[in-house]
Image (cartoon, coloured by chain):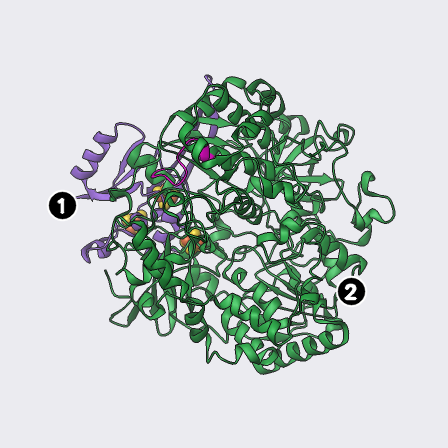
Amino acid sequence: MAEAVTQVGNETIWRTCAWSPPGCHPVGCGLLVHVEDGKVTKVEGDPEHPITRGALCTRCLALPEYMYHPDRVIHPMKRAKEDRGLDKWEQCSWDEAIDIIVTNAKEISEKYGHETIAVFGGTGREGNDYYSTYANCIFGTPNAVYAQPGWSCYGPRASITAFMMGGGYPEIDYAQKCAQRYDDPRFVAPGVIVLWGKEPLRSNPDGLFGHSIVEMMQRFGTKLIMVDPRMTWIGTRSEYVLQLRPGTDTAMAMAWINVIAEEDLYDHEFVEKWTYGFDEMVAACKEMTPEKAAEICGVDAEEIRGAARLYATTHPSSLCWGLAVDQSPNGVQLGQCLLALMSITGDLDAPGGTTLGAGDVHAANAARDDSVGSAADDRDASDYADRLEESESYPNQMEIAITYAYQYGLMTEERYAKKIGVDKYPAIGAIMWTVAPDEFLKALETEVPYKMHMAMFQSSNPVGSAIAGEPQRWRNALRKLDFCFATDLFMNPTIMACADVFLPLCTTVEHDAVVVPHYSMNISFFGAERRCVQVGECKSEMEIMLLLGKRLFPQYWGQFEDEIAYLKSKSGALDWDDLKEKVCYTNVENYYKYKTGELRPDHQPGFPTQTGRVELYSYAYQAFGESPVPYYEEPAYGPIATPELMKDYPFVLTTGARKQEFFHSEHKQVPSLRAITPWPEMDINPADAAELGIEEGDWVEMASPYGKCRQRARVTPTIKKGVVHAMHGWSYPEESGEEPSLFGNWRSNVNCLLPNSVNGKLGFGDTFKCMICSCKKVDGPGEHPSPSEAEVYVEPSRQKPAEVVGQIWRPADAPEYN
Amino acid sequence: MTQYALYLNYEFCTGCHSCEVACRNEKKIPLGDFGMKLLEDRPRQHADGSWHWDYIAYPTELCDLCADRVAEGKMPSCVQMCQAKCLHFGTIEECAAMLAEKGEKAAIFLP
Ligand code: SF4
Ligand code: SF4
Ligand code: SF4
């Protein structure tokens, strides 16, 4: 194993693992960072990283361009409130910037109450780990905000898993938790992997190294089944591609359960011993025959049967669920079916099946064992007990911070209960620490239940083009606040429109931290991020948190001398000094953790649910007012639900398929990345394009009842007739940042077409993947459209006076629940 | 003298562009030019309904097969960074053996 830091002539080479920025989820790819004269000259992939073994995506490869980009903000800046929307920023010192924030926070807390401060986070950047800590333990507010309608990313999947079976976050097995990876004697490669609503090669997976699937196809002949409205490259290498109508996934999943039950293809022993409510679930899927699903989804019934059979009769088989689960109001039922499908094959947490996570207990394990490749291959329950004891003796810093906050009155029960929207949607507050986003937007607009006064934006750009629905509404609502500040690397539409102070953030190679895939919910390794260089006066999220914490809540934050002290205490059993030398520890974990007692807090075998089993009939769903068994619901907008609207908006619209060179609204200014995808593209079928006179590369205006945007046509048979796909995340950093342009934020912003508050019963899901729109050819990109009040269109069903912002929106034909 | 080559298993080249950027970084090639270039044969459906969609990453005349790196015992930059691990470096004989073993959808490049 190479040293963590080596010197070759004038060059220092650091081995590190990456998180963010650049925008990324905790994938933790291994980097070799070449530094000369205090400057990063080149980034390579680290061949010794156990998972990525030298591979890197273009975002990290282009890291020096991003770090030293002339537009990067590398000093703190301030701007007078009356100049919001204008490029009148002034450089200031860290002291002054922190003073301004602290003065405003104190004044606003005293005058209006701490709860009138909101902390925005999101995207899966590293800062994601901290926004609730900022909110609860620095500003004393319960209102941490993830601004996406229906919390439509990851949170729903994590919550559904917690409700139905526990065990962190289910992930396919690619030997990521085996000491010798693919050569490990415990590992068996999946025979079949189902990719359901997920494109793992282009998406920015939360901890999955997507290309491992291609590795397993090459090494072991692993076969794939895709369920996706688009034909993708990986789809052309799959056994089956069920190209369904966007938003109808739940019908498809119910049909799979129907086939597997009817044809007796499930694992009887597993179902009897480890699941609860199998018969009820099967009964709920009885009517959903492949023929019926075929009609709903637009996929041949025999294809549905064939795919379900291949999945259920191949062992081991694994299922990888994607964002499509989170983004539809019917997604909670989809997730329920997919967890059932992962389970009833008997391959849950089996080698080559779908793995579960045992949580942080393994920090102790990884810290004690030597490092990659040296951990023991087999672990038994007694070994586990030792590790558990070891890890339990380390306090959880997040919990301690909250305890302090209560003890010193920074937070009170009464104030915590003021968290917006979770009274209406308690399921959102169950395992997540944020407001219900759609309700929060209404509160901002109506000042009910109370008026908000201040916001921090951290790893989030809600006025931009990735996270929010109807970002025009967010812009108008946020502009009203008394004081806003942000941490970031580049100016963005939210900061330009609303913020008064900008704090410059450093990249992954400019600070020390730990990256843990899946935010610790299913840990494959622990990786060290290292401070290889300093750029300008940039600081890490942890450093900024300490600066503010020491001023606003010294009773807790005062105990940490610096961010390393905080990092160490937060990392518990993980030995930072050792990790930074070894760079990466594989987290060796047992298979079949439900048998060894590793999933339950009482260490008994089983799953951490009320029944101790995988609850296919879900008591948790029932407790939150949802049906305990799955049902299919038509997308809120579409040919069946809104036939009248389809006359004006004849296309079904799905959005947000990833490009690996961009992370949501980021990276459009990085030359090497922009060269790969210079323009936002919408996919349209050749037959539709011909009818509308649209040719490859033409600008197309897409409109929904809520707004419009322009992107360039990619005429392709990979999308079915009647369906279009549009990219998310587009603005134009090269254009004027001032209002009304905000870096061309409104031109290609497909989120302007997507409403808020089209949520499922639990508050999850919205229309990102199942909306409708019109398409027409236009001459060019057009001028900067502006999101004036007049353009905030409310479609007829929501136009009643109080409902403009106060809608309680559910499809009229929602089924009865018992 | 031993003649080296690049072997590409293009059944599994995912079109991720990492090799392109890795090569540009290594050889300090300006944006707009390429030592390694990714080509796409865009998706279409055959008459029987099956799909065609291939990416081919191939080295241009600016490629020297990373002679300096290889001399230091390292892998060529594009090979090391390839996300799909479908790009390999070896002698012509080694690459030919891989080609013969693969039997389809593979190529050897001599820049
Ligand atoms: S996925 Fe890409 S951006 Fe994320 S750590 Fe890996 S190489 Fe970097
Ligand atoms: S071998 Fe080196 S020079 Fe040739 S294409 Fe690959 S990275 Fe470029
Ligand atoms: S890096 Fe590998 S998979 Fe990606 S485009 Fe190049 S050859 Fe293909």
Residue shown at 33% from the left, 38% from the top: A216
What hue does chain A carry in this figure? green
Question: If the image is split into quadrants, where does the C terminus of chain A sit?
Answer: top right
Chief secondary structure of the magenta portion: loop
Residue nearer the viewer, A733 or A454: A454
Q: Secondary structure at mark 2?
A: loop
Q: Which residue is mark 1?
A: B2
Q: Residue at x 18, y 56 (%)?
A: B71
> Foreground mark, 1 or 2?
2
Residue extent of the magenta highlight: A342-352
Amino acid of disc 1: Thr
In front: A440, or A799? A440
- State the image quarter where residue B59 is shown: top left
Magenta region includes residue A449? no
Q: Residues within 10 Å of mark 2 (few under 14, many from 20)?
A: some
| Colour purple maps to chain | B
Q: Chain of mark 1?
A: B
* Front position in the image: A223 or A663: A223
The circle on residue A451 is 2
Q: Is residue A306 above or below residue A697?
A: above
Picture residue at 66% right of the left edge, 54% below the top: A745
Q: Position of residue A330 (x, y in %)?
A: 63, 37
How many callouts does the rendering have? 2
In this rendering, would A56 be left or right of A134?
left
Evaluate whether residue A256 shows in this view.
yes
Say whether residue A584 is visible.
no
Looking at the image, residue A192 lies above or below residue A522: above
